[in-house]
Image (tube, helix red, strand yellow):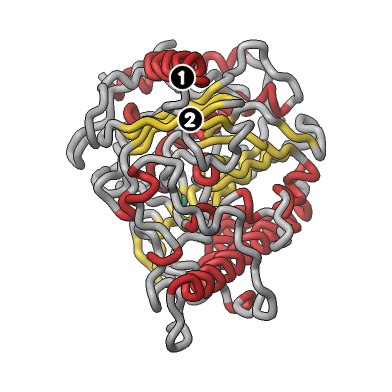
Amino acid sequence: MHYRAFWFSIASMLLAAAALPAAPTRPNILYIMADDHGYQALSCYGSKIIQTPNLDRLAKEGMRFDNCFCTNSICGPSRAVILTGKYSHLNGFLDNSNCVFDGSQPNVAKYLQAAGYQTAMIGKWHLVSDPTGFDYWNILPGQGAYYDPVLIEMGKRKKHEGYVTDIITDLTLDFLEKKRDPAKPFFVMYHHKAPHRNWQPGPKYKNLFDEVEIPEPETFNDDYAGRGAAARAQKMRMEDLEVPGDTKIAPPPGLEGAALKKWKYQRFIKDYLRCVASVDENVGRVLNYLDRTGLAKNTLVFYASDQGFYLGEHGWFDKRFMYEESLRMPLLVRWPGHVKPGSTSGDFAMNLDFAATFLDCAGLPVPADMQGRSLAPLLEGRTPADWRKSIYYRYYEFPGPHNVHKQFGVRNDRYKLICFNELNEWELYDLQKDPRELHSVYDDPDYKDVLGLMKAELQRLKDQYRDDDGVTGSRKKTSPAVKPQMQF
Ligand code: CA
């Protein structure tokens, strides 16, 4: 049924496409993603510490989204959302620990492929099952290695010598130069492993920042006093960085307490930023290739991370929480002739929207069961009157690495309500008065009305996105994704 519905929808799309005039101008789509690249670590988002001139080019020549959020701040689940345009509870990939992505379900690559695109997926995949919907794929197994990584090319494992960020770029350029079918537009997902833990820099940047001390963020010494149990129970403090796995070297003898924490932060943040420097350089190589070949003018380029990341804020590394640093994603989009150079958008975008956007920009209909919405109007500088004013978030991976409790919640432009469902605890933040989210006002009687409105909005979003399973835990490995409802 599932398959038949999919092919029926493809047939409908082809009919729709056939009704259009010949469309030689269908754009190529290059989706570039880094892993765990926090917006704080891009100069176009205001970093004073690292320079990312190549990524900044995308902002200068395109649009920077200042309010792009993920639905579930963790690697595999975010990737599954990006591919399917559906929340985790519908695409079935709830967490990294228990799930296998059900590759038989529709995804954006299948829709584009069926409409005549040549599709490729190169780099970090992290969805356990093999990619589907791609004419060519060459992926890291699991997290992959920084040095001399093995990659799996269409099912065949091969070891590559060198640094992973350079290699994934070489393979992407090789696809564009030698494997591309010039008669078709392309859809390429070019996914970096960096700057994921354990942050091994490439040879070229291993001494970057050697002579400087990176400033600690304002909330570096957060004591979690203004929040509930979850913020205290996590294991992602600087103190939790492993020696020597994360720090690479042992601390000086006798170093402890606050001094050891500071030392660990410097070790972590410098290696993290060095990894980002390689990503930036390599994205520049691909942008230069697009320029040199003339492809740039008809190519929609996205740059995003799978989620945000803590760079010492709250004393943390890692992600998972619905707090701002890990909820928010960097998103840069360049599309010559459609997106005004140097523009910004403050409207609420989500990783949920990417699949719909690719289809819409390719002139294809957005399947009715996709939950995201095309960002194309925002890219063209128009905000539809009924554009979303709030976003829904849900995280499932507990128990799990870093001990971050299950949670779901809603954020609008002023407030954020989070429910830690298994703790039976709630937090409410006034983001205008408390942008660092240090003091929950959930019990403050002054916020009684706000709380009522936010709870109602949370329920409205749960209904809208059909997350109606109450507060149950993760579905286990063998369970298939919820059947898609194709409506054409
Ligand atoms: Ca990630």
Q: Which residue is labeled 1 in the image?
A: 451
Q: Say above or below: 24 vs 254.
A: above
Q: Quadrant of the C terminus?
A: top left
Q: Nearer the viewer, mark 1 or mark 2?
A: 2
Q: Residues within 10 Å of mark 1 (few under 14, many from 20)?
A: many
Badge 1 amino acid:
Leu
Residue 393, label in figure:
none
- Residue ID at (74%, 25%): 380
Residue 441, label in figure:
2
- Residue ID at (42%, 27%): 443
Please report contact status of discs 1 and 2: CB closer than 8 Å, yes or no.
Answer: no
Q: Position of residue 482 (x, y in %)?
A: 27, 25
The quadrant holding residue 425 is top left
Furthest residue in direction bottom, as rendered: 253
Residue 289 showing in the rendered view? no
Q: Position of residue 332 (x, y in %)?
A: 67, 42
Secondary structure, mark 1, is helix
Furthest residue in direction front, as rendered: 445
Badge 2 amino acid:
Val
Camera-side residue of 463 and 213? 213
